[in-house]
Amino acid sequence: MAHVSGHSARTDKNLTRMTSLKDILIRRIALQGPISIADYMAECLMHPQHGYYQSATVFGAGGDFVTAPEVSQMFGEILGLWCADRWIAMGRPNKFYFTELGPGRGTLMADMLRATRSVAGFHEAARIVFVEASAQMKAQQAEKVPGASWHSRFADVPEGPTILIANEFFDALPIHQFEKLDDRWLERAVAAEDSGAALTPALIHAGAQLALVPDHIKSAPNGSVAEVCPAGLTVAGDIAARLSAHGGAALVIDYGYASSAAGDSFQALKAHRYVDPYAEPGHADLTAHVAFDQLAAAAESKGAKTFGAIPQGAFLMAAGIGARAQQLAAGSDPAGQRRILGELKRLTAADEMGTLFKVLAIQSTALPSAPGF
Ligand code: SAH
C-alpha cells in the first residue's frame, strides 16, 4: 500500500509539473541546448496553452499594463478621424480593409468606429480585419466589434486598399539580442541551470539574424548589446508592399527609438512592475523597444513613403486631441473635466506616454502627406 500510494503521488507531481511552461522549456533546452531570446519570447507570449496572451486579464488597472486606448476614448477618436481623412485622400474607395494588428480588447477599433459614424460612406466601405494570434483575445474582440474577421498573420489578410493601425503590437514581436565580447558578437540565449530548476541567461554563437543589425550599431564598443526584430521588419515590409500595390496608409504606435542605438531593452512587466524575464515564463508580459528607423527603412525598401517616427504627444496634439479634450470638457461636470485633463496629460505629457511612445506613418507614394507629422 505504502509503495503504491508513494508511486501515484510521484506521478501526480510529474503531471502537475508538466503543465508549466517553465518545465516545458527546461525539457526543450535539455534536449536541444540553449534557445534564442526570440524563441523564448515567442513561447512565453504565444504558446498555445501557456502563452501570456492566452490568459484572461492582461490589460487595465487589474492587469499588468494599461495601453493608450484603455486610458482614454480620445486616443481612438483621434486615430479614427486620421483614418477617415486618409480614406478621403485615397478617393473614398467603396471597399477597403480597415485592419488592426494586435487589437487587444478591441477598445481602439470600437472607439475609431464610433468617432467615424458620421463620415458618409466610410463604414459601408470598411471591411474590419483583425490580425490576432490569441484565441482568448479574439473572443474579447468579437464582443466589442461585431462584424470583424480574423487572421493570424498580416500576410493572410486579403489584398486591396488598406488602412491599418497597430498600437503596442510591434513591441511584442520576438527580438534577437547580441552582446559584443572581444570584438565579436555573440547571441544572448536562455539556458537551464545545472540543477534543471531554473532558466538562466547564456551566450551562444550568433545566429544569421546578426546580419540584420545595422552597421552603426555593430560598430558599438565591447560590452554593448544589440537587438533586432526580424518579425517586425518582415511585417513592416509586407505592409509597405501592400500599400504600394493597392493604395493606403498605416499608423504604427509603440514605445521605442526614433533612431535605434545599442542597448538592452528586453523587459518583463507584471502587475505594473518590472520583473525578472526568466523567473515565470508565460506569466509576465515580455517586450522590447521598437526600432522605428529600422521599420521605416524596411517599409521604404518596399516602395512606400514613411513619416516620423515622432513622439506620440506631438502627433496627438497636431491631430487635434487638444480641441477634442476641450469639447468633451465643455459638456462635463468639474470631476469629469479633471478626468479628461488627466487623460490628456497621460497620453501627451513628456514624463508620461507623450515622448517614449512614437508614431510612424507608412503610405503609398500616391497619397498626400500624412497629417499630424
Ligand atoms: N493594441 C491593443 C493591445 C496591445 S497588446 C491595445 O493598444 O490595447 C498586444 C496585442 O497583440 C494582443 O492582442 C496580442 O494578443 C497580440 N499579439 C501579440 N503578438 C502577436 C503575434 N505575434 N501575432 C498576432 N498577434 C499578436
Image (cartoon, rainbow, N blue to C red):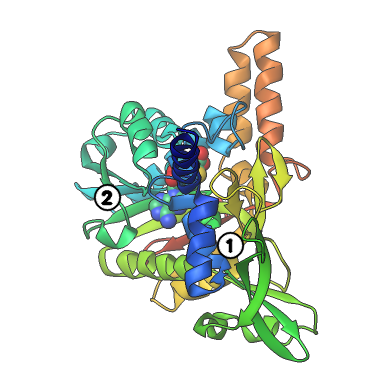
Residue positioned 65% across, 13% down in the render? 336
N-terminal of the pair, mark 2 or mark 1, is: 2
Disc number at residue 97? 2
Tell me the element at label 1: strand
Residue reaching furthest top? Answer: 333
Is residue 309 left or right of 11 when viewed as pictured? Answer: right
For the C terminus, the image quarter is: bottom right
Residue positioned 31% across, 65% down in the render? 242
Kindly identify the amino acid type of the residue bearing the numbered disc 2: Tyr
Residue reaching furthest front? Answer: 1
Is residue 147 left or right of 233 when viewed as pictured? Answer: left
Kindly identify the amino acid type of the residue bearing the numbered disc 1: Gly
Q: From the top left corner, tell me how far across and down residue 191 is, in percent.
A: 61, 68
The vertical placement of 256 against 299, above or below, is above
Q: In this view of the protein, which residue sits in the foreground, 150 or 188? A: 188
Tell me the distance, in whole angstroms, between the alpha carbons under discs 2 and 1: 23 Å
> 10 Å neighbourhood of mark 2: few (<14), some, or many (≥20)?
many
Q: Quadrant of residue 292?
A: bottom right
Residue positioned 40% across, 36% down in the render? 109
> 10 Å neighbourhood of mark 1: few (<14), some, or many (≥20)?
some
The residue tagged 1 is 308
| Camera sees residue 201 | yes
For the N terminus, the image quarter is: top left
Q: Quadrant of residue 263?
A: bottom right
Q: In this view of the protein, which residue sits in the foreground, 52 or 157? A: 52
The vertical placement of 150 against 262, above or below, is above
Residue positioned 70% across, 90% down in the render? 184
| Camera sees residue 82 | no
